[in-house]
Image (cartoon, helix red, strand yellow):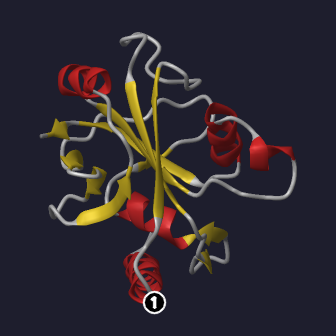
Amino acid sequence: MRDEISDAWMLAVADAARQLGRERVHVWLASGQVADVRRTGPADQPVAWFAPTRAVAAQTADGRDCEAQVETAVVLGLARWSPGNLPPQVSSWFVRLHPMGLALHDPSGQVFARGNVEVSTEWTSAALVAGVLAVYGVADPGTGPEASAPVPQRLIHARRAGLIAAAYVPLHY
């Protein structure tokens, strides 16, 4: 259950965390390697995972522990992506190419996350046709086996932990 006070508080916590320094985001690109991606869609569905390098632990007004940056993405319209659920199609968010990689833009058009990554022409072509599964969330670094696991397994672990928000969004050139 969401309320306006906890939403405003979560936005303020995430904004304060960003003001402490330039947000560093890793971007991983994938195509058709992620479990639970659109089961009826293209086998090579372009995926862009924007993963902040630092988690911002917070607590909601009802006492639930959460990650503030992911909660902010949820408040702004991305859906929490838990195992077994498919992310929704959202046209208010979008991914845009920039000279050094990709940026995830929120509904106001502001950059929500940006990361440097080499983007292939194949990935770009597929994304222009099919859209992008934009994933935002913390890759729980941990100290266990998930710390060195391949990206698809790390994404599954982060989804189970409730640390992922996602939606199918358009790619803007």
Residue shown at 62%/32% (left/top)? 152
Label 1 secondary element: loop
Residue shown at 15%/61% (left/top)? 109
From the viewer's perspective, is 28 left or right of 88? Answer: right
Nearer-the-camera pick, 7 or 90: 90
Quarter occupied by residue 159 = top right
Residue furthest to the right in view is 144
Residue 97, given in percent of the width and then of the height, sits at 21, 45
From the viewer's perspective, is 14 left or right of 105? Answer: right
Residue 41, given in percent of the width and then of the height, sits at 37, 13
Residue shown at 70%/51% (left/top)? 161
Residue picked out by circle 1: 20
Image quarter in which the C terminus is found: top left
Residue type, mark 1 in image: Leu
Residue shown at 21%/51% (left/top)? 99
Question: Is residue 1 visible to us here?
Answer: no
Nearer-the-camera pick, 131 or 147: 147
Tell me: residue 89, above or below residue 163. Answer: above
Dot 1 alpha-carbon crowd within 10 angstroms: few under 14, some 14 to 19, many 20 or more: few
Residue 34, given in percent of the width and then of the height, sits at 55, 26
Count numbered badges in the picture: 1
From the viewer's perspective, is 160 left or right of 116? Answer: right
Question: Is residue 173 visible to us here?
Answer: yes
Quarter occupied by residue 35 = top right
Tell me: residue 107, above or below residue 61. Answer: above
Residue 66, given in percent of the width and then of the height, sits at 62, 68
Nearer-the-camera pick, 118 or 13: 118
